[in-house]
Amino acid sequence: MSGSTPRRRLLPIISAPHPSGRSAMTCRFRCGDACDHAVPNQSGNEYFGDVVAKALSRRNVLRAGAVGAAAVGFGGLVGSAPAMADPGRGRGRGGGARLRFTPIEPTTADAVVVPEGYQSAVVVRWGDPVLPGAPAFDFDNQTPEAQNAQFGYNCDYVDFFPISDDRALLWVNHEYTNENLMFRGYVDGNEAPIEQIEIGMAAHGGSVVEIARSGRTGRWELVTQGRRRYNRRITAQTPMRFTGPAAGHELLRTAADPEGRNPIGMLNNCAGGNTPWGTILTAEENFNQYFVGGNGVPEADRPALQRYGISTSGDGRAGNRRFDRVEERFDLARHPHEANRFGWIVEIDPFDPTFTPRKHTALGRLKHEGATHALTRDQRVAVYMGDDERFDYVYKYVSRDRFRRGSRRHNSSLLDDGTLYVARFTGDSPEAEIDGTGTLPSDGEFDGTGQWIKLVEGDRSFVEGMSAAEVLIHTRIAADRVGATPMDRPEDVERNPVNGAIYVALTNNSSRTAAQADEANPRAANRYGHIVEIAEHRNDAGAERFNWRIPVVCGNPDDPSTYFSGFDKSRVSPISSPDNLAFDDSGNLWISTDGQPGSIGVNDALHVMPVEGSDRGYLRQFLSVPVGAETCGPFITPDQKTVFVAVQHPGEVDEATPDNPATQFPDGPGGQPRPSVVAAWHTGGGDIGN
Ligand code: FEO
Ligand code: CA
Ligand code: CA
C-alpha cells in the first residue's frame, strides 16, 4: 500500500451503530437521522403492489417466455450490441480476465489501502484553492469568502472530462457538511455564529477543478497555478433555473421568485451522472433536513412534506444547520414552497463557467441518488435514477426526441420533454419460498420480470387525480398510486457498457419485515444490502418491460443469507452497504460502500466483481478508506489507468471533535480530517484491476 501512512487511531472506530451501519454522527449530518423517523412511504404500497403483482405475475412470466426466459434473456445480453452510447471495447467481457490484482484484506487501518503494486495519492481536498486568488486553507480562520473559492466539504460523485492526454476537468459533488468537525466547539445551528452557517452553505454544492497528469503515470494532481479558466464553485446560493413541464408551476413559486422558474442553490448532491453531450447530472438527495417551520405550513400541505421526510411537528427549529438564520426562504412557515425547489436532477456544463445550472423537472422530484444515461435503440436518451429511502423506488426517464451527435443546441433540450417511469419488480418464484431469510427459492435464483410504469409523458399525467406538474413535483406520491415496488434504499443505478445490463445498488433496509420480503428485496432486516441486475427487453433502454435477477446478496460470506451468484464463498471478500457503482471497460462491476464499519466491522471499501463468465460473483476488495469515511465515486478514467474515489466524511466517528479527531487524513499529524478525492493507479502502468 502507499499514499497515506497508517496512523495512531485516536478513538475507537466503531461507535454505536445505527441501523444504516453508519455512525450516529453521519446519520445526523448526512440525512437528518432518517432511520430514526417513521418510514416516509406509508402508502402501504407493498400490499397493493403484491396484489397487482400477483394478478400480473402469470402474464409476465408468459411474456418473459416470449422474449426468452429470464436466464436466457440475461445470457443473450453478452456480446449483443447494445444500442447505447460508448459501448465498451469488451476485452474481458465482464468475465474478470483482467482482474489479476491480489485483493486486500478487509481492514480498520486508518489509511487509504490499495493492493500490492498500486499507489494512491490525494488529488484535491476540502479547502484546496478552486478559484484563482483563493486563500490557503486555514482551519481555525475559515471565512465564507474563502470557502466560496475553495473546494467544498464531503465529496461524493466524481466525474472526469479530458482536455488532453495530461489535462482534465474533475467534477465533484459536495454532498453535505459536518459542522461538528469543521468548527471547534460547534453545538448546533441555533447557537452557531452566522458566519459558520454561511461557510456551511458555501461548502455544499460542487466543484469543477482542472487537474494534470503527473509524469506518465496514472497519478493526477490539482492544478494550483495559472488561469484555470473552467474552475468553478457551485453552492447553496448559486442562481439556477427550472426546465420542463413543472417549471413555473404554482407549487414552485415563492415570494422571491413569483414566476417559479429561478431557484437558488443546490443541496445534498449525492451521486450523479453525465450526458452524451458532455454535461454533468448531479442529484439532490436528502434536501428535507435543511428546512425549518414545517409545523407552520397549512394542514393540507403537510402530507406532501411528510412524504419527503420533512418534519411537520415539534417546534420546527431543530435543524442542525439553521440556514434560515441566513436566508428566511429555508423557513417553510414563511415560504412553504421553497422545499419544492429542491430534490431535482441538476445539469451543469463543466466547460462553461457561466452556465446557469438547470433543475430538470421532467426527471421528477425525489431524494435523487444519481442519474445514469443510456441511449435507446432509436437514439433517445434514457436516464436511470434511484430514490434513496427505505421502501422507495427506482425510476427511468426517456426523452421524447432523439439524440443528435454533434448538435449541442438540440441535445440540450432532451431532458425537458419525455416520459417518466417507475419500476415494478415481480418475482417468478412462489411467495411461500421467499421467507425473508435470504434462502434461495427452489428455482435457484431471486429473479423475475418487471415493468416500467408510466407516470408522465410530456405534460400528460398517467396518475389519476394529479396533473403532470403535480406528478413531477410530488413524484413519490404519484409512484405510490401506481403500484411501484418499494425497494431497500435504491442508491446508484449504473449501466454496464459491455453487456448493456442495468445494476441497482440497494444499500440496506433494516426496517423490512419478513412479511414484507419479496423476491426483489428478499431479506428481512436487510442490514447488508444487495444488488439487482436488470436486462431491458431487447436490451433497449427504451423498453417498458425487463427481466431482473439478484447477483449479490451482501454481507459476510460466512452468513448463510449471502449470495454471490453461486461463486465459492470462501474466496470472496465481505461486503456491506453497496452504494456507488462503476464499470471498467471490460464490464467488471466496481462497488463502493457506505456503512461497513457499523455492519461488518471494517472500514468502507471499493470492491470489484465480474458479472459474466465463470468468475461471476468473484467479489474482491480493491481499496479501503480511512477511519470514519465512506467510499464514493468511483470513477475509472477512459484510459483505464486511474480510479478516482472520493473519501467522504473521514473521521466522522461519534464524539470526535477537532480537538480529538478520529483521523488526521489526509494531512497527517496535527491535521484535521479533510474530505478528499484520491487517485489510485498501478505502479507498472497497468490497467486498474490488473
Ligand atoms: Fe448520499 Fe444515498 O447516499
Ligand atoms: Ca426465482
Ligand atoms: Ca450515495
Image: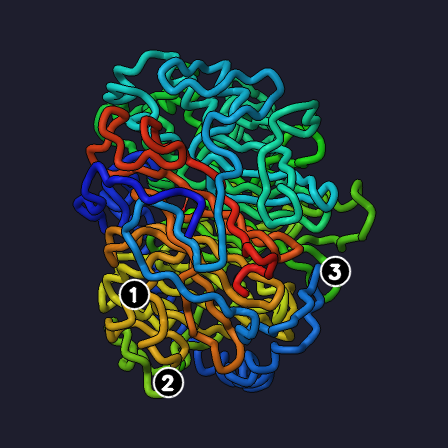
Task: Give the number of the disc on residue 379.
Answer: 3
Drawn side of residue 79 relative to residue 75, left or right? right
Q: Which of 612 and 438 is in front in this view?
A: 612
Tell whether label 2 touches label 1 (CB within 8 Å).
no
Kindly report which numbered mark, 1 or 3, lies closer to the viewer in this rendering.
Answer: 1
Residue occupying the point 55% across, 20% down? 149
How far, Cα to Cα, is label 2 from label 3? 36 Å
Task: Give the number of the disc on residue 482.
Answer: none
| Position of 50 relative to 462 (above/below) | below
Within 10 angstroms of label 2, few (less than 14), some, or many (20 or more) residues? few
Q: Mark 1 points at which residue?
A: 555
**x%, y% of residue 472?**
53, 44
Q: Mark 2 points at which residue?
A: 444
Residue occupying the point 26% across, 46% down? 35
Within 10 angstroms of label 1, few (less than 14), some, or many (20 or more) residues? many
What's the residue type where badge 2 is placed?
Answer: Gly
What's the residue type where badge 1 is placed?
Answer: Gly
Q: Does the residue labelled 1 lie within 8 Å of ligand 3?
A: no
**x%, y% of residue 14?**
20, 47
N-terminal-most mark, 2 or 3: 3
Kindly report which numbered mark, 1 or 2, lies closer to the viewer in this rendering.
Answer: 1
What's the residue type where badge 3 is placed?
Answer: Gln
